[in-house]
Image (spheres, helix red, strand yellow):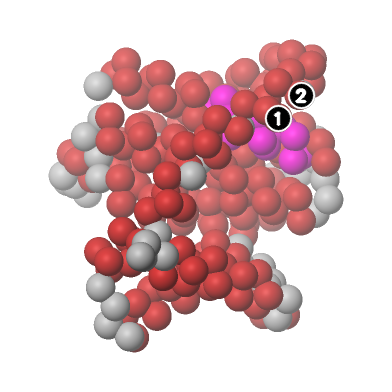
Amino acid sequence: MINLWGIILTIAVFETAKRLKKVKFLNKLPPTFMAGLILVAIILGFKLDYTSYNKSACFLTLMLGPATIALAYPLVENIELLTKNKRAVYTGFVIATITALLSSYFIGKVFHTDWNIVTSLMPKSVTTPIALEISKAIGGIPELTACIVSLTGIYGALIGHKLLKLFNIKSDISIGIAIGAASHVLGTSSCLEKHKDKQVVMATLALIVIGIITTVVCIFLF
């Protein structure tokens, strides 16, 4: 019999996290973040074997591949919007990629961090499926990369719009590019919650293109 308890537990916890989002003091937290905390609490509290859990939930990890390919759909569907605003868009993409990579590098150097941890940090602003492959390719630790990517997304989802408002950024195109480029899918979800269609489109395009650019740059550098 196939061991599916990890998949069942993960889906059940995620559905629970989505319902918890309706609670007033929890509605600012992304369901992914809450689901992660609940899973950690369950695994530690019931002293479950993480290796066994990970193995039984591996199908969900395998789905990251098709999910990555599916990102091409919104890119093709909105290619006109991308080309129409190409000057602002591509400038933002390049600056975002360089900033994400260099900030990881210099933070690692300042704190005398091991090189494999530095390389694990570098894809922090890229959506998880792509970030994990980049981490593997450049000698990082995929599990650590997954944690950092999640934290980056949560941070962007929680304060991204507030920070841009503080700097008086009002353009939906600029906001979408900034959110998607810096905090990938989780940041993009915050645009969706605000019902800002143009922000969602630009954030989606940003997270896709940033993923492609980061992949090429990292492979070229390493």
- Dot 2 falls on a residue whose secondary structure is loop
Name the chief secondary structure element in magenta.
helix
Identity of the residue furthest to the front in this view: 1
Q: Where residue 21 sits: x, y (%)?
A: 68, 73
Q: What residue is shown with label 1?
A: 74
- Evaluate whether residue 149 shows in this view: yes
- 88 to 203, vertically: above or below: above
The quadrant holding residue 107 is top left
* Secondary structure type for disc 1: helix
- State the residue at coordinates (25%, 45%): 141
Rendering coords of residue 100 (x, y %): 44, 35
Distance from Cα at disc 2 to Cα at disc 1: 6 Å
When the figure is inspected, residue 41 is found, relative to residue 52, above or below; the finding is: below
Q: In the rendered structure, which segment of residues is drawn in magenta?
A: 199-210
Q: Give the amino acid at mark 2.
A: Asn
Question: Residue drawn at (34%, 77%), measured in percent from left and top?
Answer: 43
Residue 214, x across and y down, in percent: 44, 26
Q: Which mark is residue 125?
A: none
Left or right of residue 1: residue 149: right
Q: Are marks 2 and 1 in contact (CB under 8 Å)?
A: yes
* Residue 65 vs residue 122, the one in the foreground: 65
Q: Amino acid at mark 1?
A: Pro
- How crowded pointer 1 is (Cα within 10 Å; few <14, some 14-19, many 20+) is rated as some
Residue at 49% x, 23% y: name it: 212
On the image, numbered disc 2 is attached to which residue?
78
